[in-house]
Image: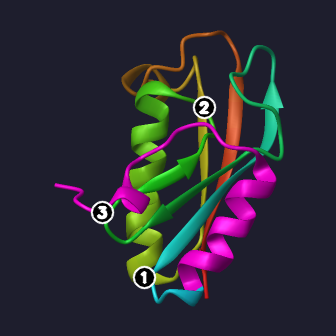
Amino acid sequence: MLSHPEMEPRMIASDEDVLRAAQEWRTAGRKVAIATVIETWGSAPRPAGSHLLVDGEAAFLGSVSGGCVESEVVSEALEVIETGVPRLLEFGVADETAWKAGLSCGGRIKVYVERVD
């Protein structure tokens, strides 16, 4: 699986760390996408402005939610890396996908995912 220490997945990092890593990963030639929480309603695990950085090998840094929602965002980010087409993702208790993804805290979040070129 992941064999290089710098590619070990880490969930929580400061947003400054995530943005700095995005630049470093791109400079190193890695394909990357960044996911950003753009809106929250009610109870949400992470505030608006939170980031998750994902590379083409599914290594990640930061957090936009946690649990299965995070896994779904990583999966979507991999597609964004390949296609270059940004995506707006929504998770909430009224959405069947959110239950599947595990956001049962009663809140809703919107996450924008874009490739970093």
User: In 3D space, how far apart are the residues under numbered discs 3 and 1 (Cα atoms)?
Assistant: 26 Å
Residue 18 shows in this picture: yes
Residues marked 3 and 2 touching at CB (< 8 Å): no
Q: Amino acid at mark 1?
A: Thr
Q: Amino acid at mark 3?
A: His
Please name whichever residue, 106 or 69, is drawn nearer the observer in this view of the structure. 69
The image position of residue 16, as x and y in percent, is 80, 56
Task: Identify the magenta region.
Answer: 1-26
Q: Amino acid at mark 2?
A: Ser
Q: Residue at x 51, y 83 (%)?
A: 84
Q: Is residue 87 left or right of residue 106?
A: left
The image position of residue 18, as x and y in percent, is 68, 57
User: In 3D space, how far apart are the residues under numbered discs 1 and 2 (Cα atoms)?
Assistant: 24 Å
The quarter of the image holding the C terminus is bottom right
- Looking at this view, name the residue that lies furthest to the top: 105
Q: Secondary structure at mark 2?
A: loop
Q: Residue at x 37, y 24 (%)?
A: 100
Tag nearer the camera, 3 or 1: 3
The image position of residue 104, as x and y in percent, is 54, 11
Whichever of callouts 3 and 2 sits on the residue coming sooner in the sequence is 3
Q: Secondary structure at mark 1?
A: helix
Please tell me how crowded label 2 is: few (under 14), some (14-19), or many (20+) other residues with Cα within 10 Å.
Answer: many
Whichever of callouts 1 and 2 sits on the residue coming sooner in the sequence is 2
Query: Would you name the residue on which mark 2 appears?
Result: 65
Q: Secondary structure at mark 3?
A: loop
Check residue 114 for magenta coloring.
Answer: no
Q: Is residue 110 left or right of residue 8?
A: right
Residue 83 marker: 1
The quarter of the image holding the N terminus is bottom left
Query: Would you name the residue on which mark 3 appears?
Result: 4
Whichever of callouts 3 and 1 sits on the residue coming sooner in the sequence is 3
